[in-house]
Image (spheres, coloured by chain):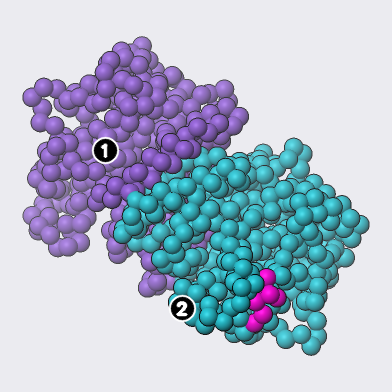
Chain colours: A cyan, B purple
Amino acid sequence: MTGGTGEFELIDRLRERLGRSDLPVGPGDDAAVLPPSSGPVVTVDTSLEGVHFPRGWDDPAGIAYRAIAVSLSDLAAMGATPGQVLIALGVPPGHERGFWFSLADGVVEAADRLGVDLAGGDVVRSPALFLSVTAIGSLPEGQDPVTRAGARPGDLVGVTGSLGGARAGLVLRGDLESDGPADGELVQSQRAAVTRLIDRYLRPVPRLEEGVAFGREGASAMIDVSDGLLADLGHIAGESGVGIELEPDSIPVDPDLQEIGDLPGAADPVVFALLGGDDYELALTFPPHLLDPLEQAAGQSSVGLTVIGSVVEGEGVELPAGFADPRSGPLGEHGFEHSF
Amino acid sequence: MTGGTGEFELIDRLRERLGRSDLPVGPGDDAAVLPPSSGPVVTVDTSLEGVHFPRGWDDPAGIAYRAIAVSLSDLAAMGATPGQVLIALGVPPGHERGFWFSLADGVVEAADRLGVDLAGGDVVRSPALFLSVTAIGSLPEGQDPVTRAGARPGDLVGVTGSLGGARAGLVLRGDLESDGPADGELVQSQRAAVTRLIDRYLRPVPRLEEGVAFGREGASAMIDVSDGLLADLGHIAGESGVGIELEPDSIPVDPDLQEIGDLPGAADPVVFALLGGDDYELALTFPPHLLDPLEQAAGQSSVGLTVIGSVVEGEGVELPAGFADPRSGPLGEHGFEHSF
């Protein structure tokens, strides 16, 4: 799933040439902040058939819902509240009207449940289904955005909810659709777990309230877990100029991953939690004295906050000595998806 | 180029369900206006290989420049000044790095020349090259947006610059690339005209200063000419609940269209001006007493403003009796491109 070097250089070139913008927060974080200093917070995210969901995926409402939720998650990671979305939609030939009705229903459902207005759209005929969702939000009065660049040595590292479930759901769904090994061997309780895992992928819940609360309470850096915990914490480490020491045993693994055991690719659940993206939990850093108020903020919605490591002098994300680094394993390749 | 009915119904369904938004100007105009009442002005537009430019088009800088210019044109049509863009980019396999460098250069060139910051982006691997450009602008202090809904009987109808050139450029470029009939028969002066026409398509100049000036001077309705003059004035007529009487003889036809004569499809230049979109001029309505200040505003940039008709009670866009309506002719079919 890795693109050619040309595309990576394209992004570098754009960042380099355009990073000297006058924006309070420029491109390169979860979202940009427009002037004045706490002006609108904006981000764009594309969901494309064959990349972010399989070709022929038969749940157009879910596709639309997920595309919007994923874009709003970037606002949550800045501590911003979403206000509006604009959707550029590419429609391939060959679908019945019911498909498009369902997709429209997914847009409406997401707008209603996630509290945003649809402020614009553009529909073009395209070889593959895609939705590019621009999300526009705002910061609470007097509140600074929480960027990726604020982590300081001595901070703790926390994550909301649980990890690994979404990617497992995607893998399992693929197995089920291809009549792979997964279905036949499942007992009833495992079937229920699989359903929840697939839902975890298809209907992620952006941590909107939690993101605002974390910003209010003083989180120093924040990102949403979209590429995978190790990759996303790596962004915080890089932008903040610090190192992060992670304690794998403390990572909250999705309980349904334990339930189904070693089904998806026979991988350790912790490896799924470390590498598997798409959970759209929030990972954040904060001074230790803020642990109580942040836990309370996350507990109010029963999402929860777990401390999984600490910020140190240095660079990159480190695992304990003796823990096999999954980034060099067979699941360690990253998908082709880059924001700038 | 017409899509199936499902896609049209999709748009209707979205507009119907989501049109009841609380936005000062909701989706359905050139751009939406966010709260407060003269808050940010936002729009999104996709440029897609095979739809908005031919597959294999060898000018990636031009593709990027055009995609951004076209999106900013929607802001101009609201009387807004552009501030930022976000770009969702779909990159197909098979291009050399030079292609992506050139595309990045086109983004930078457009940002510099058109005065916008790049506030975000997302790059995904895609079967076809596309750029979905979200543009964010602002209205001058105390200025209302100029929507499509404000035309009143008695108003005059005007258009900036000249029309028909861009579509002719697209047709001619296709002819030249396929070694069609166009190239061999051209004399020198015609070659120069063809070059300018192709540039007219590839490098449209959004009428940014003019749009702001027209808003300030009190234009009652405004739209940019993207789908074609008749189609776009039809949007003003429909949204305003009025009719528009057009005088074809007064329409400013691109002078290069006259130069090359009947080359592109042997069509009358006036027909190209009536049906051919992509010129990104501004069409507007205004009370007759504003003609002088509006002409002055358009004259300052030497773009010019031409009166081409008037607003009446009724509906739709009417041509004089005896003038063959080109909408029922072979060029009358519209491309598949819809905004909501």
**Magenta segment, prevailing SS (helix, strand or loop):** helix
Q: Nearer the viewer, residue B58 or B55?
A: B55
Is residue A245 visible in this depiction of the protein?
Answer: no
| Tag 2 residue | A179
Q: Residue at x 59, y 71 (%)?
A: A191
Q: Is residue A60 visible?
A: yes
Whether residue A257 is in magenta: the answer is yes
Query: Residue B90's x, y, as percent?
Result: 44, 61
Q: Quadrant of residue B154?
A: top left
In the rendered structure, which amino acid carries the disc numbered 1? Gly
**Element carrying mark 1:** loop
Which residue appears at 75% of the width and 57% of the height? A303
Give the distance between the C-alpha atoms of the residues marked 2 and 1, in whole angstroms: 50 Å
Numbered label attached to residue B167: none
Q: Which residues are magenta?
A: A256-262
**Image quadrant for the C terminus of chain A?**
bottom right
